[in-house]
Amino acid sequence: MSKPEISSRRMTSVVLRYGLAVLSVCIALSAALLLGHYNFPDVADPLFLFAIAIAVWYAGPGPAILALVLSSLANSYFFIEPIYSIAITRSDVPHFAIFILFASLLTGFAAVRRRVERDLLQSRDELEREVAERTQQASLLNLTHDTIFVRDMSDVITYWNRGAQELYGWTPEEAIGKGAHQLLQTVFPMPIDEIRGELLRAGRWEGEIEKTKGDGTQVVVASRWSLRRDEQERPVAILETNNDITERKRTEEKIRKLNEDLEKRTAELEAINKELEAFAYSISHDLRAPLRHMAGYAELLQKNASSILDEKSRRYMTMILESAKRMGDLIDDLLAFSRIGRAETRKTMVSLEQLVKEALNEVRPETDGRNMGWRIGV
């Protein structure tokens, strides 16, 4: 809408309001003259006051003042001696003063009442808008499957959405008006006074709590509380959202128990490895002494008696010495293997072909003469 149109409408409104004041005074004057013609005295003042009341009620204070002035002039001209004259004598002053005072009181009362009524209508419209907005918000919250409910500062439930019904099993009719902590049998991770203190201080609180469903089963939820305050910053309500984490907590508990079992088994394995290491060290130490004696005496025998031994006996002596050396290597390997648990793991390249060759060299003397075939690299 353009500015000229707005100005034109405002001008029309002003003309109508002041026209109403003039019209109401004219009607009151006509009625007073008509009633006076039929011998109904003293009706002018009430009629003029009624005209002023209509003007202030429907047109506002400005038109009411105009109606008051016009009524005073008409009353003086048509009904106060000498009539058809605006002259006011000393004796007429009290009458005019009372009329103007009463008219002013009536105007003021009507203006105040009109303002109060306008404020009430405005408050009602604002309340209706707020109710409509809250209803729309509640409808939107009810569409989500998240668990949301609202309670007042006495923990009485005032709103319960569909997600809360799906999780806990109570309908809104069953839940609203009940104490939240009593209905859900809430188990808190800390004293409730500490939680309330943090909520009032920070405006929110988060934590994991246990609740009981309508069928008696318990659930663990991740709960978030948000504090709502009014215009005077007074706490009035708490909005709570819950997410069911029962399965997650069960999984975490299973993982915790498995970790405990793993740590226990690891400790047992470490103890066993230490025992094996001590055993291997003891065995290797006990085996070394007789092995050294056997190898030493075999060397002496080979050295001193080689001249009187035949070829077959010398080969036997060589095999004894080689076996003794091989056993010494095995003892060293046993010691190294027993200490492998304390060594740092290192990655290195290993030749499998070389390993196979070494293994074949070890077992080939025992397989000579047997019908055996070896196939490598196939």
Image: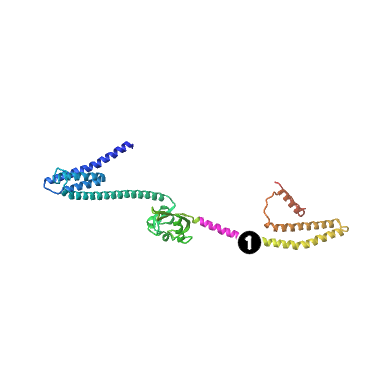
Residue at (51, 55) in percent of width and height: 248
Give the magenta-colored segment's residue range: 248-267
Residue 238's quadrant in the figure?
Answer: bottom left
Q: Is residue 302 above or below residue 97?
A: below
Residue 10's quadrant in the figure?
Answer: top left
Q: Main secondary structure of the magenta part?
A: helix
- Which color scheme is applied? rainbow
Image label count: 1
Residue at mark 1: 268
- Image location (x, y in percent) of residue 129: 35, 48
Which amino acid is tagged 1? Glu
Q: Is residue 20 visible?
A: yes
Residue density around tag 1, few if under 14, some if 14–19, many if 20 or more, within 10 Å: few
- Image location (x, y in percent) of residue 135: 37, 50
| Nearer to the camera, 81 or 331 | 81
Residue at (41, 50) in percent of width and height: 141
- Image location (x, y in percent) of residue 349: 69, 48
Q: Is residue 60 visible?
A: no
